[in-house]
């Protein structure tokens, strides 16, 4: 694979949290591991010993101890830590290593001045809001919904809700009414907390109309709480409380309702691009253990760190980010347009907040590269020691750009996982080098394998990404799926007893991983499976191309089918034959003749979800005759109008194909 871009320092075992964990295993368990691979193998082969070690090493606060680590390891249906009761919020608010006056939440945005909360202030706000929810009649099992951005109030609400054993769900306020009601009509919330609007860059976005429509569509609502965010002087919606009333002074102590390990903590949703979004229920204990492991041992975060990830409250990376105080780290929140006034905004934010770990998406890093940005020339990034990338595969040139323009001594961690497990199951670790274009390793406790078409595990070959042993953060189920049928169909239908994730992965002989796109969006040319990620890496590497989407239309007769490429070009450019030839030449040279598309067409925009994922499958459905409204839920898209061009194109092709060809 690629070049080595970073190697662990000689004293990594003395300085890192995973080094500390290895010493703890030696001292408390009598276990010694020669290297990361040996540690990983133990973690996936002796699940009970590994996950119990995470529980003990991080000193999980429990109200009653577990009677075992896991019952039957068969999937689905594994029960973790039976008998244990605990509370996620209690473990997060412990904030190990932090004093009362240490800042633990630093929030910046484009709607209001920055806000900082110390450890004591965060606990106090959670105490007050929990008391406010209790006054509204919220009890364990009730649902509390937040139509609110990545701001301290949303975080406080999550912790207050979970402290009561109630169940949290958030949608980012850029979600349209339909997207929100498609999610929340399924879980029937009792309380809605909503902002009046927000600023995106310098543009005010009023959401009062959407809030009214959401309230009208949710008959289960008993209370609405308004956050005067866009207009601090504004009144709450009619019949609603204000946030200040919810968080009014009270002398009720902060208490934590002990709940079973698998008690629902929050409901996340699949992107909902086709059909209703799946309501994925995550549990208190599974999320806590997974995030303690990942944040401390893989990201090496602790009390000296300031952890930033660019995300909205509609993406699971928000849930991942806000667990970081559980390992003592300070979280940096940002709400707004990451490209305003230019792509340097988040890098300058990193300087201002002295961020030590900067998380973002692969498309953002590639956009910075394309714009010719050199972050270290526009911001002092001396505090930065880690960069995280997810959301899409990061190609080798993205890795190289980070090391050339951000910093050569930091560790770049490309990770992949999903909403379904609310974590990354492949990522980085302080003990291993970083290779260009490669995800470093499989995470501890995550038995990730590549499977060939006949179901056998393969090394060094493209295969289906599967997980062959249970993880505590696998969903406790889907909402309103009493017999578990939808849950089984989603993950366990293809390989009984094995989790099929829906991505293509290649795992090399040293454990490095390359993910090459969704397996349901695969390009299959002449029996060779091609992932879409490497395709985009080449096409979007051209100066003329801003964005692209590629689909393969199979031939019913078993022929090669058609490979269609759609490109968004830089401003003022038109697709002509010379550019078509250039794109084909690049693909043939960089990849193979099989990657050369049959047709290339120019479009205004590539359809993307609100978390910036390309919609290859809905585009393919539209091109094969599915009506737009059936192919994708428009409310789940950043740019629903972008689908129209594909529908028009499909109609034109259909009429062309209907025209009889001369004999």
Image (spheres, helix red, strand yellow):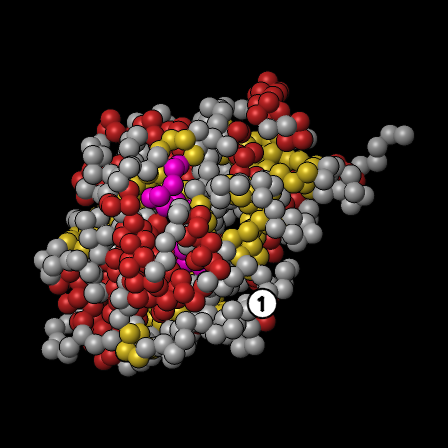
Outermost residue on the top side: it is 578
Residue 307: x, y in percent?
26, 48
Place residue 585 in its image quadrant.
Answer: top right
Q: In which quarter of the image is the C terminus?
A: top right
Figure check: 517 above or below 437:
below
Residue 471: x, y in percent?
46, 62
Q: Residue at x 28, y 74 (%)?
A: 62
In this picture, which residue range is highlighted in magenta? 421-434
Residue 216 shows in this picture: no
148 or 124, which is in the foreground?
Answer: 124
Q: Which residue is drawn at 11% across and 59% down?
A: 99
Q: Which residue is drawn at 60% across and 53% down?
A: 631
Figure check: 591 above or below 458:
above
Figure check: 438 above or below 400:
below
Outermost residue on the left side: it is 101
Can you identify the residue that label 1 sits on? Answer: 488
**For residue 361, side relative to residue 646 (left or right):** left
Figure check: 457 above or below 364:
below
Outermost residue on the right side: it is 663
Q: Residue at x 22, y 32 (%)?
A: 379
**For residue 134, side relative to residue 401 (left or right):** left
465 or 105, which is in the foreground?
Answer: 465
For label 1, the crowd category at 10 Å Cα-Cα, with few meaning under 14, some 14 to 19 and many 20 or more, is some
Residue 23: x, y in percent?
29, 54
Residue 424 sits inside the magenta stretch:
yes
Residue 341 sits inside the magenta stretch:
no
Place residue 649 in its image quadrant.
Answer: top right
- Tell me the SS state at disc 1: helix
**For residue 574, side relative to residue 350 (left or right):** right
Residue 330: x, y in percent?
21, 53
């Amino acid at each position: 694979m690629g070049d080595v871009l970073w190697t662990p320092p000689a004293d990594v075992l003395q300085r890192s949290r995973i080094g500390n964990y290895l010493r703890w295993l030696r001292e408390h368990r009598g276990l010694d591991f020669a290297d990361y691979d040996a540690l990983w193998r133990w973690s996936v082969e002796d699940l009970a010993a590994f996950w119990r070690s995470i529980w003990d090493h991080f000193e999980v606060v429990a109200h009653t101890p577990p009677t075992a680590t896991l019952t039957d390891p068969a999937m689905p249906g594994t029960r973790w830590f039976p008998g244990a009761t605990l509370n996620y919020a209690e473990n997060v608010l412990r904030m190990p290593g932090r004093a009362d006056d240490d800042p633990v939440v630093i929030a910046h945005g484009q709607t209001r001045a920055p806000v900082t909360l110390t450890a004591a202030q965060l606990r106090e706000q959670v105490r007050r809001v929990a008391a406010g929810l209790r006054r509204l009649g919220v009890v364990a099992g009730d649902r509390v919904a937040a139509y609110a951005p990545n701001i301290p109030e949303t975080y406080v609400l999550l912790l207050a809700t979970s402290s009561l054993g109630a169940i949290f769900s958030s949608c980012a306020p850029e979600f349209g009414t339909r997207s929100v009601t498609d999610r929340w009509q399924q879980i029937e919330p009792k309380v809605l907390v909503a902002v009046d609007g927000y600023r995106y860059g310098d543009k005010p976005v009023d959401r009062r109309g959407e809030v009214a429509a959401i309230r009208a569509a949710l008959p289960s609502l008993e209370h609405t709480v308004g956050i005067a965010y866009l207009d601090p002087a504004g009144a709450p919606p009619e019949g609603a409380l204000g946030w200040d009333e919810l968080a009014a002074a009270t002398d009720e102590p902060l208490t934590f309702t002990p709940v079973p390990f698998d008690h629902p903590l929050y409901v996340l949703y699949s992107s909902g691009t086709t059909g209703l979004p799946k309501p994925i229920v995550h549990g208190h204990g599974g999320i806590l253990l997974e995030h303690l492991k990942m944040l401390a041992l893989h990201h090496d975060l602790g009390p000296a760190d300031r952890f930033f990830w660019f995300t909205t409250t509609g993406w699971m990376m928000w849930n991942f980010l806000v667990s970081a105080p559980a390992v003592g780290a300070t979280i940096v929140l940002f709400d707004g347009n990451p490209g305003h006034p230019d792509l340097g905004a988040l890098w300058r934010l990193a300087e201002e907040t002295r961020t030590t770990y900067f998380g973002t998406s692969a498309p953002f890093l590639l956009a910075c590269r394309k714009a010719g940005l050199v972050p270290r020339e526009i911001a002092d990034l001396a505090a930065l020691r880690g960069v995280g990338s997810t959301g899409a595969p990061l190609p080798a040139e993205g890795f190289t750009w980070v090391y050339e323009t951000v910093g050569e001594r930091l560790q770049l961690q490309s990770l992949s996982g999903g909403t379904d497990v609310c974590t990354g199951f492949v990522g980085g670790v302080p003990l291993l080098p970083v290779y260009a274009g490669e995800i470093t390793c499989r995470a501890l406790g995550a038995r990730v394998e590549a499977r060939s078409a006949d179901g056998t595990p393969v090394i060094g070959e493209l295969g289906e990404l599967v997980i062959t042993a249970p993880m505590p953060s696998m969903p406790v189920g889907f909402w309103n799926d009493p017999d578990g049928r939808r849950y089984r169909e989603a993950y366990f239908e293809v390989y009984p007893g094995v989790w099929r994730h829906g991505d293509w992965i290649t795992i090399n002989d040293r454990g490095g991983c390359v993910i090459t796109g969704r397996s349901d969006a695969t390009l299959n040319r002449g029996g060779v499976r091609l992932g879409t990620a490497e395709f985009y890496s080449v096409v979007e590497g051209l100066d003329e191309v801003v964005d692209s989407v590629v689909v393969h239309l199979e031939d019913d007769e078993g022929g090669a089918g058609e490979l269609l490429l759609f490109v968004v070009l830089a401003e003022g450019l038109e697709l002509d034959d010379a550019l078509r030839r250039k794109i084909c030449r690049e693909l043939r040279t960089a990849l193979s003749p099989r990657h050369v598309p049959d047709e290339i067409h120019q479009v205004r925009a590539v359809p993307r979800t609100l978390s910036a994922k390309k919609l290859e499958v809905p585009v393919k459905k539209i091109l094969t005759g599915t009506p737009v409204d059936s192919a994708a839920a428009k409310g789940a898209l950043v740019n629903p109008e972008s689908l129209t061009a594909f529908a028009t194109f499909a109609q034109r092709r259909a009429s062309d194909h209907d025209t009889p060809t001369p004999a």
